[in-house]
Amino acid sequence: MSNTVGYAEIAANYRKQIQDGTLSPGETMPSLRQVCERYGVAQTTANRAYRALKMEGLTIAKAGVGTVVAGPISNNIGSRVQLFENTGKALDGGESSRILEVGTVGADELVAPRLDVAPGTPVHVRRRLVSRGGMPVHISSSYYPAYVIAAAPELAEPVSTGGSRELAAARLGHAQDRVLEEVTSRLATGAEKEHLGLTAGDVVVSQVVRTVTLTDDRVVEVAVKITGGATILRWTTSLVDNT
Protein backbone atom coordinates (compact mmCIF):
# COMPACT_ATOMS: atom_id res chain seq x y z
CA MET A 1 0.00 0.00 0.00
CA SER A 2 0.99 3.63 -0.37
CA ASN A 3 3.37 4.97 2.25
CA THR A 4 1.08 8.01 2.53
CA VAL A 5 -1.26 6.02 4.80
CA GLY A 6 -1.48 7.72 8.19
CA TYR A 7 -1.92 6.31 11.66
CA ALA A 8 -5.54 7.52 11.84
CA GLU A 9 -6.48 5.51 8.74
CA ILE A 10 -4.79 2.40 10.12
CA ALA A 11 -6.54 2.83 13.47
CA ALA A 12 -9.89 3.38 11.71
CA ASN A 13 -9.49 0.13 9.78
CA TYR A 14 -8.85 -1.95 12.90
CA ARG A 15 -11.52 -0.04 14.86
CA LYS A 16 -14.11 -1.04 12.26
CA GLN A 17 -13.01 -4.69 12.39
CA ILE A 18 -13.32 -4.70 16.18
CA GLN A 19 -16.71 -3.01 16.17
CA ASP A 20 -18.25 -5.24 13.49
CA GLY A 21 -16.92 -8.43 15.11
CA THR A 22 -14.35 -9.33 12.46
CA LEU A 23 -11.81 -9.13 15.28
CA SER A 24 -13.41 -10.66 18.37
CA PRO A 25 -12.64 -10.12 22.08
CA GLY A 26 -9.46 -11.88 23.13
CA GLU A 27 -8.17 -12.22 19.57
CA THR A 28 -4.51 -11.28 19.02
CA MET A 29 -3.93 -8.23 16.85
CA PRO A 30 -1.30 -8.29 14.07
CA SER A 31 2.20 -7.50 15.30
CA LEU A 32 3.63 -4.03 14.70
CA ARG A 33 5.95 -5.57 12.11
CA GLN A 34 2.97 -7.04 10.25
CA VAL A 35 1.17 -3.68 10.36
CA CYS A 36 4.27 -1.95 8.96
CA GLU A 37 4.51 -4.48 6.13
CA ARG A 38 0.82 -4.36 5.29
CA TYR A 39 0.53 -0.58 5.19
CA GLY A 40 4.08 0.30 4.14
CA VAL A 41 4.64 2.58 7.12
CA ALA A 42 7.34 3.12 9.72
CA GLN A 43 7.02 1.47 13.11
CA THR A 44 6.37 4.84 14.75
CA THR A 45 3.21 5.20 12.61
CA ALA A 46 2.04 1.66 13.40
CA ASN A 47 2.74 2.20 17.09
CA ARG A 48 0.77 5.45 17.07
CA ALA A 49 -2.23 3.70 15.49
CA TYR A 50 -2.14 0.96 18.12
CA ARG A 51 -1.79 3.54 20.88
CA ALA A 52 -4.98 5.24 19.62
CA LEU A 53 -6.87 1.93 19.79
CA LYS A 54 -5.55 1.30 23.29
CA MET A 55 -6.55 4.78 24.49
CA GLU A 56 -10.07 4.15 23.16
CA GLY A 57 -10.29 0.98 25.24
CA LEU A 58 -10.53 -1.24 22.17
CA THR A 59 -7.31 -3.19 22.79
CA ILE A 60 -5.13 -4.14 25.74
CA ALA A 61 -1.56 -5.38 26.11
CA LYS A 62 -1.23 -9.00 27.21
CA ALA A 63 2.11 -10.23 28.55
CA GLY A 64 3.72 -12.87 26.36
CA VAL A 65 1.07 -12.45 23.66
CA GLY A 66 1.08 -8.88 22.41
CA THR A 67 -1.91 -6.66 21.71
CA VAL A 68 -5.32 -8.29 21.98
CA VAL A 69 -8.87 -7.10 21.40
CA ALA A 70 -10.47 -6.00 24.66
CA GLY A 71 -13.70 -7.44 25.97
CA PRO A 72 -17.09 -6.03 24.98
CA ILE A 73 -17.24 -2.25 25.38
CA SER A 74 -20.22 -0.21 26.49
CA ASN A 75 -19.92 3.47 25.59
CA ASN A 76 -20.98 6.18 27.98
CA ILE A 77 -23.75 8.61 27.18
CA GLY A 78 -21.40 11.35 26.00
CA SER A 79 -20.14 9.08 23.24
CA ARG A 80 -23.72 8.15 22.32
CA VAL A 81 -24.84 11.78 22.12
CA GLN A 82 -21.86 12.65 19.92
CA LEU A 83 -22.52 9.62 17.72
CA PHE A 84 -26.15 10.66 17.21
CA GLU A 85 -25.13 14.21 16.34
CA ASN A 86 -22.60 12.96 13.78
CA THR A 87 -24.58 10.11 12.20
CA GLY A 88 -28.22 10.38 13.28
CA LYS A 89 -27.88 6.90 14.79
CA ALA A 90 -27.87 5.88 18.44
CA LEU A 91 -25.92 2.65 17.82
CA ASP A 92 -22.28 2.30 16.87
CA GLY A 93 -20.90 0.10 14.09
CA GLY A 94 -21.62 -3.59 14.63
CA GLU A 95 -24.18 -2.86 17.37
CA SER A 96 -27.77 -4.03 17.43
CA SER A 97 -30.62 -3.45 19.87
CA ARG A 98 -33.52 -5.75 20.77
CA ILE A 99 -36.47 -4.48 22.79
CA LEU A 100 -37.22 -6.70 25.78
CA GLU A 101 -40.06 -4.76 27.40
CA VAL A 102 -42.12 -1.61 26.94
CA GLY A 103 -44.77 -0.57 29.43
CA THR A 104 -45.75 1.20 32.63
CA VAL A 105 -44.25 0.32 36.01
CA GLY A 106 -44.19 1.81 39.48
CA ALA A 107 -41.03 3.85 40.07
CA ASP A 108 -38.82 1.96 42.54
CA GLU A 109 -36.54 3.40 45.20
CA LEU A 110 -33.70 3.71 42.69
CA VAL A 111 -35.61 5.51 39.95
CA ALA A 112 -38.19 7.54 41.92
CA PRO A 113 -35.89 10.11 43.57
CA ARG A 114 -34.00 10.68 40.32
CA LEU A 115 -37.26 11.42 38.51
CA ASP A 116 -38.40 13.48 41.51
CA VAL A 117 -41.55 11.42 42.03
CA ALA A 118 -42.86 9.36 44.94
CA PRO A 119 -42.04 5.63 44.97
CA GLY A 120 -44.75 3.69 43.18
CA THR A 121 -45.62 6.57 40.81
CA PRO A 122 -46.41 5.16 37.32
CA VAL A 123 -43.54 5.78 34.91
CA HIS A 124 -42.82 4.43 31.46
CA VAL A 125 -40.00 1.95 30.84
CA ARG A 126 -38.24 0.84 27.67
CA ARG A 127 -35.94 -2.13 28.30
CA ARG A 128 -33.60 -3.39 25.59
CA LEU A 129 -30.60 -5.63 25.05
CA VAL A 130 -27.66 -4.11 23.16
CA SER A 131 -25.20 -6.45 21.44
CA ARG A 132 -21.97 -5.85 19.54
CA GLY A 133 -20.83 -8.32 16.91
CA GLY A 134 -23.63 -10.63 18.04
CA MET A 135 -22.37 -10.67 21.65
CA PRO A 136 -24.60 -9.23 24.42
CA VAL A 137 -23.01 -6.11 25.90
CA HIS A 138 -25.58 -4.55 28.22
CA ILE A 139 -29.22 -4.34 29.22
CA SER A 140 -30.53 -0.79 29.29
CA SER A 141 -33.77 0.18 31.03
CA SER A 142 -34.88 3.76 30.30
CA TYR A 143 -37.51 5.32 32.57
CA TYR A 144 -39.55 8.33 31.44
CA PRO A 145 -41.94 10.57 33.39
CA ALA A 146 -45.48 11.19 32.11
CA TYR A 147 -44.65 14.53 30.47
CA VAL A 148 -42.05 12.86 28.23
CA ILE A 149 -44.53 10.25 27.00
CA ALA A 150 -47.14 12.97 26.42
CA ALA A 151 -44.66 14.81 24.19
CA ALA A 152 -43.31 11.68 22.47
CA PRO A 153 -46.03 8.97 22.47
CA GLU A 154 -43.88 6.88 20.11
CA LEU A 155 -41.87 5.85 23.17
CA ALA A 156 -44.88 3.85 24.35
CA GLU A 157 -44.62 1.59 21.29
CA PRO A 158 -42.41 -1.54 21.20
CA VAL A 159 -40.43 -0.36 18.18
CA SER A 160 -37.06 1.34 17.87
CA THR A 161 -37.15 5.12 17.52
CA GLY A 162 -33.50 5.42 16.47
CA GLY A 163 -32.78 7.71 19.44
CA SER A 164 -35.49 7.81 22.11
CA ARG A 165 -33.88 10.41 24.35
CA GLU A 166 -33.07 12.65 21.39
CA LEU A 167 -36.67 12.38 20.17
CA ALA A 168 -38.00 13.32 23.61
CA ALA A 169 -35.65 16.29 23.94
CA ALA A 170 -36.63 17.56 20.50
CA ARG A 171 -40.35 17.28 21.29
CA LEU A 172 -39.90 19.04 24.62
CA GLY A 173 -38.05 21.84 22.86
CA HIS A 174 -34.92 21.79 25.02
CA ALA A 175 -31.51 20.26 24.36
CA GLN A 176 -29.82 17.72 26.60
CA ASP A 177 -27.68 19.66 29.03
CA ARG A 178 -25.98 17.35 31.54
CA VAL A 179 -25.87 13.79 32.79
CA LEU A 180 -25.06 12.26 36.15
CA GLU A 181 -23.70 8.71 35.85
CA GLU A 182 -23.43 6.60 38.99
CA VAL A 183 -21.61 3.26 38.88
CA THR A 184 -21.98 0.46 41.40
CA SER A 185 -21.94 -3.35 41.48
CA ARG A 186 -24.52 -5.93 42.54
CA LEU A 187 -25.56 -9.52 41.89
CA ALA A 188 -27.35 -10.17 38.61
CA THR A 189 -30.99 -11.23 38.57
CA GLY A 190 -32.00 -14.44 36.84
CA ALA A 191 -33.41 -12.55 33.84
CA GLU A 192 -30.25 -10.44 33.50
CA LYS A 193 -28.05 -13.54 33.56
CA GLU A 194 -30.18 -15.14 30.86
CA HIS A 195 -30.13 -12.11 28.53
CA LEU A 196 -26.40 -11.46 28.99
CA GLY A 197 -25.43 -15.11 28.64
CA LEU A 198 -23.96 -15.34 32.16
CA THR A 199 -23.89 -18.90 33.49
CA ALA A 200 -22.26 -18.84 36.94
CA GLY A 201 -24.39 -19.18 40.06
CA ASP A 202 -23.77 -15.77 41.63
CA VAL A 203 -22.64 -13.23 39.04
CA VAL A 204 -21.57 -9.70 39.91
CA VAL A 205 -22.59 -7.12 37.31
CA SER A 206 -21.85 -3.42 36.94
CA GLN A 207 -24.83 -1.10 37.25
CA VAL A 208 -24.68 2.38 35.72
CA VAL A 209 -27.51 4.75 36.63
CA ARG A 210 -27.67 7.85 34.45
CA THR A 211 -29.91 10.85 34.99
CA VAL A 212 -30.18 13.13 31.96
CA THR A 213 -31.34 16.71 32.43
CA LEU A 214 -32.45 19.21 29.78
CA THR A 215 -31.47 22.87 29.56
CA ASP A 216 -34.73 23.77 31.35
CA ASP A 217 -33.69 21.54 34.29
CA ARG A 218 -36.33 18.90 33.63
CA VAL A 219 -35.22 15.26 33.74
CA VAL A 220 -35.77 13.64 30.35
CA GLU A 221 -34.61 10.13 31.25
CA VAL A 222 -33.32 7.96 34.05
CA ALA A 223 -31.65 4.84 32.69
CA VAL A 224 -30.24 1.80 34.42
CA LYS A 225 -27.60 -0.07 32.43
CA ILE A 226 -26.43 -3.55 33.46
CA THR A 227 -23.22 -5.08 32.09
CA GLY A 228 -21.39 -8.31 32.79
CA GLY A 229 -17.97 -8.32 34.42
CA ALA A 230 -16.19 -8.79 31.08
CA THR A 231 -17.65 -5.58 29.67
CA ILE A 232 -15.49 -2.47 29.80
CA LEU A 233 -17.26 0.74 30.79
CA ARG A 234 -15.57 3.50 28.85
CA TRP A 235 -15.31 7.21 29.64
CA THR A 236 -13.10 9.76 27.96
CA THR A 237 -12.72 13.14 29.66
CA SER A 238 -10.76 16.05 28.22
CA LEU A 239 -8.15 17.46 30.60
CA VAL A 240 -7.65 20.57 28.50
CA ASP A 241 -8.99 23.84 29.91
CA ASN A 242 -10.93 25.45 27.05
CA THR A 243 -12.07 28.45 29.07
Image (spheres, rainbow, N blue to C red):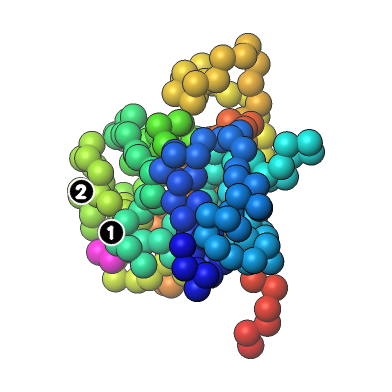
- Disc 2 marks a residue whose amino acid type is Glu
Instruction: Check disc 1 and report the residue beneath it.
Output: 167
Mark 1 and mark 2 lie on one chain; the one further toward the N terminus is 2
Q: Which mark is residue 154?
A: 2
Q: Is residue 101 magenta?
A: no
Whether residue 115 is visible to the viewer of this picture, yes or no, is no
Whether residue 129 is visible to the viewer of this picture, yes or no, is yes
Q: Reply above or below: 89 against 176.
A: above
Query: In x, y percent, where is residue 37?
Result: 58, 55
Determine the CA span between mark 1 and mark 2: 9 Å
Query: In x, y percent, where is residue 70?
Result: 61, 41
Q: Which mark is residue 41?
A: none
State the image quarter where residue 202 is shown.
top right
Query: In x, y percent, where is residue 18?
Result: 49, 45
**Few, some or many residues within 10 Å of mark 1 (<14, 14–19, 20+):** some
Give the residue displayed 34% in from the left and 39% down from the top: 97
Q: Are marks 1 and 2 in contact (CB under 8 Å)?
A: yes
Query: In x, y percent, where is residue 68?
Result: 64, 41
Q: Nearer the viewer, residue 125 or 166?
A: 166
Residues drawn in magenta = 167-171
Q: Is residue 168 magenta?
A: yes
